[in-house]
Amino acid sequence: MKKRKRRKSNKIVYIFLLALIILGIVIYHFFFSSSKFSNEVGKTFNEVVENITKTTEAYKTCMSEEGLKEEDFSEELLAKRDEIINLYNGVNADFMYTDLESDYSFGEGEDDKNYAASVTKLPTVFYVYKQADAGKIDLDKELTYSSKYTAGGSGIIQNEKVGTVYKLRTLLEYAIRYSDNIAYDMILDEIGGINTVKEYWEHLGYKIEYTDRFGNLTPSLGNGYIKEVYKYYLTGVDNAKKLVDDMKNSYNSEYVKTENVEVAHKYGEYVEGGDYYNDVSLNFTEHPFALSITSTLGLTDKMENLFLKTHELSVEFNNLYYQEKGNYCMEKSRIIK
């Protein structure tokens, strides 16, 4: 059986197109450069090149800056969106999907409050890294684990001796990778408490409500955290890359990771206080998206199935969304005067 030939990539098509343009220039130069006819040919040639350039730029602009409106969705895309929303019918959970390139969003209970639990460690660690970038915090400063920080719950420092010394950068890593409660409390003490974090994020335009050192969370706020993390990551600075790398390797990733898609996430769990289980994530598909889920399902099979299915369908939605957006932008970019 003969293997089917793969379709040529856009890169090959563009190279072929460029070769045709160069060939046209050569033909024009050697055969028509001194004639009246050459002026007309040259004018037409220049118009073609200009049109190709405008079309390409219009397509790129559409893909990077415009969201596909729901009125332009196909029935298949609408059905995929509704399939995700329907997962939350009669379930004690809410979610929000946000495309990080076009900012298109949808969800269920996007602004409903839930106890944040350890998700709040993410905006705190983000704040410290940003302050370090600005030269206001020294990540190599050494902090001592004293008895006042003794705590149970998640983390690994609780297994170490009181009096152990840690660099601030190590505590930041532990707070994300292991959701370490002791590391989190040591960080908060170092920066002046949770109100410091609150004021910073409110300055960025986000409304945060702290009832304790963890506070509340909505899916829309969770996606706000992820938006800022993604923008930070795109700067390429070392601390941003470290943050995202720790999020990719953090605990409980098995509840949000789908095949062939890297996920940088932060979970929050407080089963004893009301079965709270939440997760905010940056999903590295070809066109990355944010996905935040809040629930009172606890660490159960029902939670695991819901979270995994939401991620699976969101990846499918994202891929289909960009297929349709690509067709839309291609059609729109052809309309050039």
Image (cartoon, grey):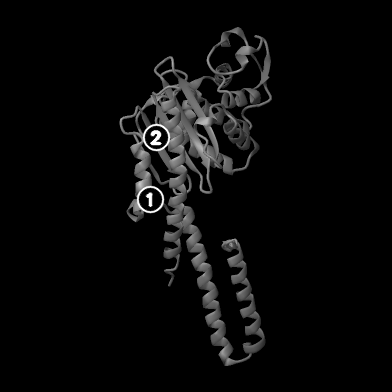
Front residue of 141 and 229: 229
Q: Residue at x 35, y 49 (%)?
A: 78
Looking at the picture, does residue 211 appear above or below residue 133?
above
Which badge, 1 or 2, comes first in the chain's sequence? 1
Q: Which residue is mark 1?
A: 77
Q: Residue at x 60, y 61 (%)?
A: 3
Front residue of 72 and 147: 72
Residue 311 visible = yes
Helix, strand or loop at disc 1? helix
Helix, strand or loop at disc 2? strand
Q: Position of residue 185 (x, y in %)?
A: 55, 17
Position of the N terminus, as image quadrant, is bottom right
Amino acid identity at mark 1: Leu
Looking at the picture, does residue 116 appear above or below residue 203?
above
Q: Residue furthest top?
A: 147
Q: Which residue is mark 2?
A: 95
Q: Residue at x 63, y 90 (%)?
A: 34
Q: Position of residue 151 (x, y in %)?
A: 55, 11
Amino acid identity at mark 2: Phe
Q: Is residue 308 left or right of residue 82?
A: right
Per the model, the C-alpha gap separating discs 1 and 2 is 18 Å
Label 2 environment density (alpha carbons within 10 Å; few <14, some 14–19, many ≥20): many
**In which image quadrant can residue 330 be found?**
bottom left
Position of the C terminus, as image quadrant, is bottom left
Front residue of 204 and 78: 78
Front residue of 1 and 90: 1
Query: How many numbered badges does the structure rendering display?
Result: 2
Q: Position of residue 147 (x, y in %)?
A: 60, 7
